[in-house]
Image (tube, grey):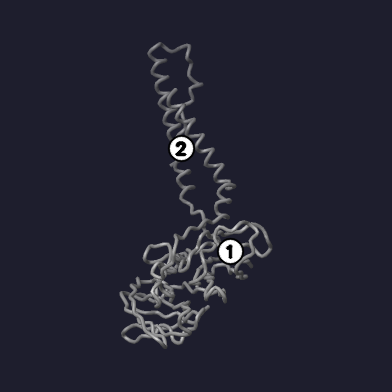
Amino acid sequence: MRRYPNTGAPERAAPDASVLSLHSLTADQEKATMTRTNRTRRIIVCGVAALAIAGLVGLGAAPANAASADDGWIRIGHLSPDTRAVDVALTPASAGSPVLDLHDVSYGEVSPYTAVPAGDYELTMVPAGSPDGTSPAISTEPTITAGQATTVVAYGLNESLRTTVFVDDLSGPATGEARIRVIQASTRVKDLDVATTTGVPIATDAKAGSASAYADVPVGPWNLMVTAPSASYDTSVTLAPGTVNTLFVLDNASGGLTITSVLDSSGAGDAPDGSLDTGGGGLRDAGGAGTFASTTDAARHAADADPFAAIGRFVTGLVQAAAAALRS
């Protein structure tokens, strides 16, 4: 097992009917010529419509939050067990509108990664549903680096709520292996160890609000043991080849601990994933209430002002004109 330090065909021309001397044609010839001309027109119009539709489909395939070379990725976690659901805003430090809004984020929920331009930001959390201008319950100032993934979490009890920023290493592990780390966010124990039941250590003496080093382990199902001074807990995870995973240790609803795996990246060279490998919207095993709902306002506003939208409307008009021509 290796450990890694923290740091993440040309068009055919239509016949030119203008060279035909219509006055010299017989009625049958004229009818035949008009039939050929109409057929040609239909072929051309259909071709244009097909190309337009193909172009429209191609435009629609582009992701709303596609990353550029100047973007980094960020995801947000609510890991404070007695803090109510929050709304989260990520705003450039130079001011302006938020580039990311998350709404009604409850305990134990971790958002997917979102691509944002590299730079300095202010991240604020307010009680869910608060009006504009509400003072944040907590804030932090993360710096997003181009090509780098970052996780920002709020953790601890509400009376001593804190934030921390983790730099994520999403480089792929060796063939046949998966990469994992532990983020310790339980408030019930001061420190803990996480190891496989076969004795392979994943985290040792992990303090609240800390992340372990990354470790590469063979793929497949693993039974894990979380050991704290007062108790121990076991769980199981299945690690797929080439994936990078974070194991979150949280308080559960019954007074104990739970450990849940979040898929950070599904393979080498892939964009960050950040989704739960269970397919849910949050760390449900931790007893978090509510459903995670997120909207990327920057992406939505960009879609409204996107020049491709105008192209799409133009193409739609072209297709409608083509349909009208076919009916004539």
Q: Within the image, what quadrant is residue 249 found in?
A: bottom left
- The residue under label 2 is 11
Residue 192, percent across and down? 43, 85
Toward the viewer: 79 or 277? 79
Q: For the C terminus, which image quadrant?
A: top left
Toward the viewer: 212 or 60? 212
Q: Is residue 134 left or right of residue 111?
A: right
- The residue under label 1 is 126
Q: Is residue 177 left or right of residue 207?
A: left
Residue 163, percent across and down? 56, 73
327 in relation to 174, above or below: above
Circle 2 SS class: loop
Residue at the image point whose x is 41% and y is 73% from the top: 252
Q: On residue 113, which mark appears?
A: none
Residue 315, percent across and down? 51, 38
Q: CA distance from mark 2 to mark 1?
A: 59 Å
Residue at the image point whose x is 38% and y is 71% from the top: 242
Dot 1 crowding, Cα within 10 Å, few <14, some 14–19, many 20+: many
Circle 1 SS class: strand
